[in-house]
Image (spheres, grey):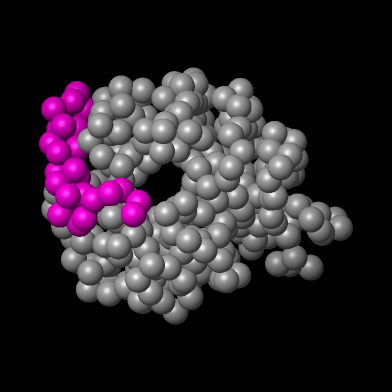
Amino acid sequence: MMSQIDILISEVGPRDGLQSIESIMSTQDKKNWIQAEAKAGVREIEVGSFVPAKLLPQMADTAELVRYAKTIPNLTVAALVPNFIGAKNAIDAGVDKMCLPLSVSETHSEANLKKNHSQVLEEVKIISQYIKTLDENDRPEFEGNLSTAFGCTLEGKVSEKAVLSLGVKMMELGCDEVGLSDTTGYANPAQIKRLIRLLKKEVGNENLTSVHLHNTRGLGLANALAALDEGITTLDSSLGGIGGCPFAPGASGNIVTEDLVFMLDAMGINTGIDIEALLAVNQMVKKALPNEELYGFTIDSGLPKGYTDGGWGLTD
């Protein structure tokens, strides 16, 4: 039986990380990465994106990765889908969870998905209707992700009213939940807290449990703590901080999984992840991506002398 955890870490490196770099990791190396992180205790991994290979050749093997990851016990297998075709392919592959991004910045939406808000919402509606036709055991969780919710490199400031109205609309159209994404790393802790509170009032506490953060301006972990203060229970992160959005110029990497797990572990917040095993995965991925730079303070400095998990430093 799996032990209870306090916070779920959703590893997005195989998707958000690999889609943003020039190197194309081999399918076997991706499988090794997924297997190793699951063995380290990571319970949810976004293994790829169901987009055309001609647009993102790094994601061409996503269906194979889903089928492989589904053989790993106690692992929730997630994938990004941009439209109904992608969702159908994801469902056929056996995915447990699908995330569809709707950029609050319509300029970013048109650059990222080649669709305006109305067109993306129509995709949400079609996907939701299709899921309802499936047997209950075959229905994946369907999350609507509000991208560029805290600002956009193409438009600048994003309207909070637009975030709220689009979040409500996605729920009305059939999403199981919505998530907030700081796609471009614009957010600060006060903004994180405010928008989570506002959106929860609109969609309900139980329908907003996750945030996706980037560390573009060094505020990633501070924003993660702010989100936890507001009751968020799922945090996206990427091994080695790999990642960004290829359609949002200047958007740098996700928050580093190793640093996030170390922070939470040292605070006595249980993620179920073995930090030493996770650091070993970093080295494995680094070897598989020799031409790419991985980031992180914990991997560079090592664990503190005498470190023990589960609240190290909180007591004498």
User: What is the x, y in percent for residue 111?
Assistant: 34, 54
On screen, 226 above or below 74?
A: below
Residue at the image point whose x is 55% and y is 60% from the top: 252
The answer, for residue 70, to whether it is visible in the render is no
286 is higher (above) or lower (below) than 71: below
x, y percent for residue 53: 42, 31
Question: Of 90 and 251, which appears nearest the observer?
Answer: 251
> Farthest residue toward the front?
54
Residue found at x 21% / y 55% = 116
Compared across the picture, whether 220 is left or right of 186 comes to right
| Numbered disc total | 0
- Residue 236: percent from the left, percent from the top? 49, 52
- Give the farthest residue toward the right: 305
Along the viewing direction, whichever of 220 and 246 lies nearer the viewer? 246
Instruction: Decide whether the magenta segment is chiefly helix, strand or loop.
Output: helix
Q: Residue at x 58, y 42 (%)?
A: 22
| 236 or 14, nearer to the observer | 14
Whether the magenta-drawn stretch holds residue 133 is answered as yes
Q: Is residue 206 left or right of residue 124?
A: right
Q: Quadrant of the C terminus?
A: bottom right
Left or right of residue 210, residue 74 in this image = right
Where residue 217 appears, as percent x and y from the top left, is: 57, 71
In-front residue for pair 47/19: 19
* Looking at the image, residue 258 lies above or below residue 72: below
Q: Quadrant of residue 191?
A: bottom left
Q: Quadrant of residue 109?
A: bottom left
Q: Is residue 132 visible?
A: yes
The residue range painted magenta reads 111-136
Residue 173 falls within the magenta-colored stretch: no
Q: Residue at x 35, y 76 (%)?
A: 157
